[in-house]
Amino acid sequence: MKSDYLKKLPLKTKLSRFFMHWFLLTLVWFGFTNTFAAQEVLTGLIVTAMISFLSIRLFTCCDLRILSPGKILYMLQYIFVFLIALIKSNIDVAKRVLSPSLPINPGIVKFKTKLNKNFAKMVLANSITLTPGTLSIDIVDDTFYIHWIDVKTTDPEQAYKEIAEPFEKILLKIF
């Protein structure tokens, strides 16, 4: 099914996705080899181009448009918002561990997302899971199920505002 989807895409989009994949793999290559010797660079470019060509059907979430200056700024904003949420949640969980008298109210909450792309939903789910005190359990269509260490509300709209809204506002601008 995914290959049928790829066949319907215009050549320009296919090439853009190929080059995006190739660019990311080349960055990983240079990160692992940590050298810019001519033969290493040439080998890296050839190997990553072959891997990108052979696996293009598997990685079709992003194309070169994601590297536009505006989207890069939103990505940096996302990282900043994520780090703030990460610090706050780490402090909250550390307080609960160090002071067992603090109440916890664990439970599962659900909320709906406005994100349409699966890749954006995956980024949101991982961001939620990486912040201590919350764990993404499942995503069914546009509904997220989250285990929360201290359920403050069971209202889906309020849970969305507490857990996902800061992330999702920026993700909607990126994807």
Image (tube, grey):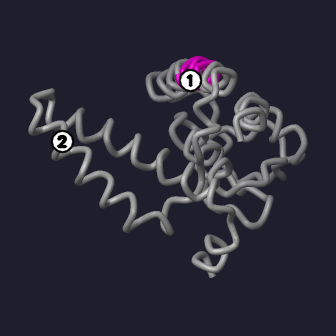
Q: Looking at the magenta stretch, what is its main secondary structure?
A: helix
78 inside magenta stretch:
yes
In the image, 111 versus 52, the foreground residue is 52
| Residue 6 appears left or right of 157 | left
Residue extending furthest toward the front: 11
Mark 1–mark 2 Cα distance, whole angstroms, equals 32 Å
133 or 129, which lies in front?
129
Q: Name the residue under label 2.
A: 42
Q: What amino acid does circle 1 point to?
A: Ile
Q: Residue at x 67, y 51 (%)?
A: 121
Q: Earlier in the sequence, mark 1 or mark 2?
A: 2
Q: Name above or below for residue 23 compared with residue 7.
A: above
Q: Is 7 displayed left or right of 164 in the figure?
A: left
Q: Where is residue 70 in the image (x, y as percent from the top left)?
A: 69, 22
What are the residue bounds of the magenta stretch?
76-86
Q: In which quarter of the image is residue 175?
A: top right
Q: Where is residue 59 in the image (x, y as percent from the top left)?
A: 50, 59
Residue under circle 1?
A: 79
Local crowd at mark 2 within 10 Å, few (<14), some, or many (≥20)? few
Q: At x 24% / y 51%, what residue is drawn? A: 46
- Viewer-nearest of labels 1 and 2? 2
As drawn, 119 above or below 26: below
Q: How many marks?
A: 2
Is 4 left, or right, of 90 in this rendering?
A: right
Q: How crowded is mark 1: few (under 14 residues within 10 Å), some or many (20 or more)?
A: some
